[in-house]
Amino acid sequence: MNLKDRLLKLLNTGNVRSVKAKKNILASFGIKGVSILIGFIFVPLLINYLGTFEYGIWITLGSIVGWINYFDIGLGNGLRNKFAEALAKGDNKLARIYVSTTYAALSMIFGAFFVIFLVANPFLNWAVILNGPEAMRSELSILVMITVGFFLLRFIFRMVAIIIIADQRPALSNTFDPISNVVALSAILILMKTTDPSLINLGIVLGGAPVLVLFIASFYFFSKDYKEFKPILSLVNFKYFKDLAGLGIQFFIIQITVVVIMSTNNLIITQVVGPEAVTSYNVAYKYFGLITMLFVIITNTYWSAFTEAYVKKDFLWIKNVMRGMIKIWIGIILIISVMLAVSAPFYSIWIGDKVQVPFMLSAFTALFVVVYLWYSIFIYFINGTGKIKLQLYTAVTVAIFNIPLSIFLAKNMGMGAAGVILGSCITYLPGAILGPIQYYKLVNGKATGIWGK
C-alpha cells in the first residue's frame, strides 16, 4: 500500500463525524499554511512600508479595534452552538430563524454602536491613546473611523463563516482569510509602488479586503449551499433572541475577559515601554503563534462536532478525540522547545536587524503557548457543550488581576514586554487546571452543580 492509499484509508476510517473532521483538519492545514506564509510576508513588508514606529501604532490600533469583536454580546458563538444543535435535531426551520434573528440583532447593535462612535470620535485624542506624536492626531482619528467602520461590516458579514463552521465545514470557512490576505497583499504592493507610506491607505486596504470577500461569500453561499438558511426579515423572531443571547451573553463576558487578558497587552506595552517594544512583542508572538494557529485548526474543527456528539451522548467518541489531542500537545512541547532554541537566528533571517527580540520575551511567549494550548483542548470541548458557567466565573476572576499583574511585572519588576506575556501565562493557569476536571465530570456523568451548568 503506497502513501496515498494509506492516507486515504486513514481519512476514511471511523464514523461519519470523525471522517468529516479529519478531512476538514487536513484541508485546513493546507489553507492555514497559505495564511501563515502570507502573514510572515506581511510583517517585514509592513515594517518596511511604514517603519517600526508606525507599524507599532498600527498593531496597537488593531488590538483596540479588535475589542469590537466582543460587542456582539456573544451572538456569534451563540449562533454557532444553536445552529449546530438545530441541525443535529433535524429542525432546519429553527436553524433559519436563528440565522435571521442573529443578522437582525447584529445589524441593530453595530449600527447603534457606529453612530455613537461617530459622535464620540472627534473628542478622542488617538495620538495620546496610541502614544503617537500630536501631529498625527487628525490622521489617526480618520484612520480609526475607517478601521472601525470596516470592522463592523466585517463582523456582520462574517456570520456566513460561522454558519459554515457550525455545519462542520471549517476548512471551507478558513479559505476566506487567505483570500482576503491575498487581495490585501496585492493592494499593498501596488500602494508601495504608487504612493507614499500612509496609515490611512493601509487601513482602507486591510479593512476593505475582508469585507469585500465576505460580502461575495455571503451572496454566493446563501444562493447555493445554504439557500434554505438564507436570512429573511419575516423569520426574524426576537423570542428566540433569548436562546441565542442566554448562552451568548456568557460567551460575551468570557470574550471580554480575553480582551483584558490578551488584547490589552499591546496597549500596556505601548504605555509602559513604548511602540517599538510592541513590534518586538508582535514578532515573537507571531513566531510562536504559528503553533497556536495550527493547533486551533484541530480544536476549532471539533467544537461543533462536540456539540453534536454531546447532544447525541456519544461520549466514547469524545474521549477518543480528547486522548488524541493530548498526545498532539505532548509532541508540541518538543516542537516549541526547538523553536525557542533557534529563535534568534530565525528572527535575524526573517526580520533582519530592524527589530530586536530579547530571549526572555521569546521564552515566556513559548511558555504561554504551551499553557494556552493545554487550556484550549478542554475549553473547546466545554464550549461545544455550552456548560460554560464555571469558565465564566474563573475568567472574570483572573481577568481582574491580569492588568495590574502585567503592569507590575513589566514596570516594577523591570521585565518589559516579557513581563506582560508572563502575566497572561499566569492568568490562564486556573482555567488550565479546572478545564480537565470539568471535562472528566461531563463525559462521565458526574457533572453536578456548577460543573454541569
Image: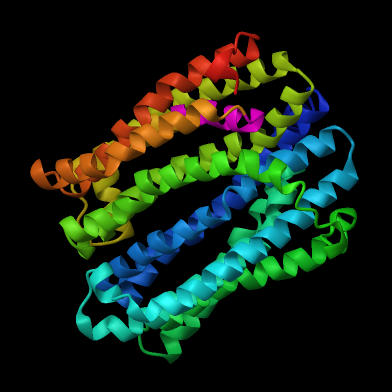
Dividing the image into 4 quarters, which one contains the C terminus? Answer: top right
Dividing the image into 4 quarters, which one contains the N terminus? Answer: top right
Answer whether residue 348 is visible to the viewer in this image.
no
Answer whether residue 374 is visible to the viewer in this image.
yes
Relative to 144, residue 259 above or below = above
Q: Main secondary structure of the magenta part?
A: helix
Residue at the limit of the structure toward the front, as seen here:
239
Residue 444 percent across, percent down from the top left = 64, 9
Q: With 385 as the anchor, is 91 left or right in this view?
A: right
The structure residue drawn at horizontal position 60% and vertical position 19%, both measured from the top left corner, is: 452
The structure residue drawn at horizontal position 55% and vertical position 18%, both measured from the top left corner, is: 451
The structure residue drawn at horizontal position 64% and vertical position 32%, both measured from the top left corner, is: 384
Q: Magenta part of the protein: which range? A: 374-386
The structure residue drawn at horizontal position 56% and vertical position 13%, both measured from the top left corner, is: 440
Relative to 238, residue 111 above or below = below
Residue 195 percent across, percent down from the top left = 41, 90
